Each structure stands twice: as C-alpha cells, then as structure tokens.
Image (cartoon, rainbow, N blue to C red):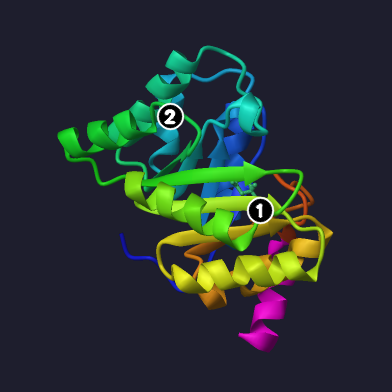
Amino acid sequence: MHLVKNMICIPIVDNNIGTALKNAKKALEVADIVEFRVDMLKEVDESVIEEMAKFPCIITVRAYWEGGFWKKSNDERIKLIKKAIECNAKFVDIELREEKNKELVKFRDEIGSKTKIIISYHDFEKTPSYEELIKIVEDGLKIGDITKFAVMARGKEDVLKVLNVINKYEGEIIGIAMGEEGKLTRILGVHFGSILTFASMEGKASAPGQIDVKKLKEIWELIL
Ligand SMILES: O=C1C[C@@](O)(C(=O)O)C[C@@H](O)[C@@H]1O
C-alpha cells in the first residue's frame, strides 16, 4: 500500500452505520484514512464490514478489556475482523493482548489478502519505561506488520520516551502519548517515523489528546 507522508487518520465514532459512512466520506475530504471504531456501533454484521472496507480505512473492533466498547462474543469480533481481511481492508487493528492475533495474520497470509495488520497496545494510566515500550514494539512486529501503542503521558519525559521509540522504528510504528501532556507526539510523531497520526473532526475524538484535523494541518504547515 502506498503510504502518503504525514498521514492523518480520523476515527469514526458514530453508533449508527449510516451516519458513520456519511462521516467517513466527510472525513476523507480532509484526511488520508479513517478508522472505523466498529465497537462503537449499536449494530454491525459482515455486510457492514464489507461497506467499510471500500474506504481507505483501519477497521478496529476494540475489546472492552483494552479500553473499547465491544462486549459481545470474542468469536464474533474475530469473525468481523476476518471479514475485513477477506475484503482487503487497508488495515485492521488487533490487540497485542488478543490471543488470536497470530491466527488473524495466518488467515491473511493463507487467503492472500492485501490487508496490513496493526498490532496495538494501550495503557490509559501511564507510559511504560523505554525498555518496556521497546519490548511492546518488538513483540508486535514479531506478529504483525505495524505496531501501534497509545499510552498515557504524565509529563515531558514520557513525550521524549515515545518520540525516541518512534524514531527507532520508523515506517513500522504508530506511537502515541495520549492526554494533554502527550499532544506533541500527535504533532511530531509522523516526523520521527509514525506512519500516521489520529486527529479528531467536529469535536468527536476516540481518545484523550486528539487534535482537531484543521488545527493539526495549520500546525504542520508552520513546522513540518
Ligand atoms: O489505538 C488507537 C489510538 C487512539 O487511542 C489514540 O490515542 O488516538 C485512538 C483509537 O481510536 C485508536 O484505535
């Protein structure tokens, strides 16, 4: 997949599929890719996934135990992600902690899907040590194509830690320090090697610290 430089991803957080698809079209007027947060939809089935996969997107069905809203069966969740892979969605996101993540990569390889698999890790309380972050990234890259981590920044040291890790894994990472303290990583992360950054649209964010897409572009105009 051709990745544009400084790619912006807007999460689609609507709970109704019609609105989600409408907002995805709108988001793609100002961003490169959208993330469908399927776990936030009231109802979803494989036909919905098929529609989503037609967009340049990440399909995420975030488990509740990783900060998401999916509380139905995990088998159903894995089935939906497999459908996304069958439909050649540009990316799917699966957690490092999900025991079936390797099964999804094997499935992708067996059917010859073009989907890139993001292995993600979240910590909504703190930023792990530099060494722990390196292990998270290394473990993720042993399984999938891209490692993503989103951890809560509690100060400037956390921002430096995250940017240093991003810089070490340029092109195969999405590194985010969440929260007000972590905003600099959402601005500078792509400069140090993240393949994309998440930005909000019309005040709808999927995580703390996301910057409005229009403001982010203005900042990038000035500094990147
Ligand atoms: O993992 C991530 C990153 C994120 O948590 C963020 O901090 O922007 C937003 C989520 O929607 C996405 O799945």
- Magenta-drawn stretch contains 213: yes
- Magenta-drawn stretch contains 143: no
For residue 180, side relative to residue 49 (left or right): right
Measure the alpha-carbon separation of dots 2 and 1.
34 Å
Task: Give the mark toward the camera: 2 or 1.
Answer: 1
Residue at image position (47%, 60%) is 173
Q: Quadrant of the C terminus?
A: bottom right
User: Secondary structure of the magenta portion, mostly?
Assistant: helix
Q: How would you rate the neighbour count of disc 2 (Cα within 10 Å): few for under 14, some for 14-19, many for 20 or more?
A: many
Q: How would you rate the neighbour count of disc 1 (Cα within 10 Å): few for under 14, some for 14-19, many for 20 or more?
A: some
Residue at image position (77%, 56%) is 209
2 and 1 marks in contact (CB < 8 Å): no
Q: Secondary structure at mark 2?
A: helix
Q: Secondary structure at mark 1?
A: loop
Residue at image position (82%, 65%) is 155
Q: Does 196 sit above or below residue 204?
A: below
Depth order, front residue of 96/178: 96
For residue 27, side relative to residue 218 (left or right): left
Q: Residue furthest top?
A: 73
Amino acid tagged 1: Pro
Pointer 2 residue:
49
Amino acid tagged 2: Ile
Q: Position of residue 26 (x, y in %)?
A: 60, 51
From which residue to which does the magenta span run? 212-224
Q: Quadrant of the N terminus?
A: bottom left
Return the mark for residue 128: 1
For residue 81, side relative to residue 111 (left or right): right
For residue 127, side relative to residue 31 (left or right): right
Q: Position of residue 70 (x, y in %)?
A: 60, 22
Depth order, front residue of 1/184: 184
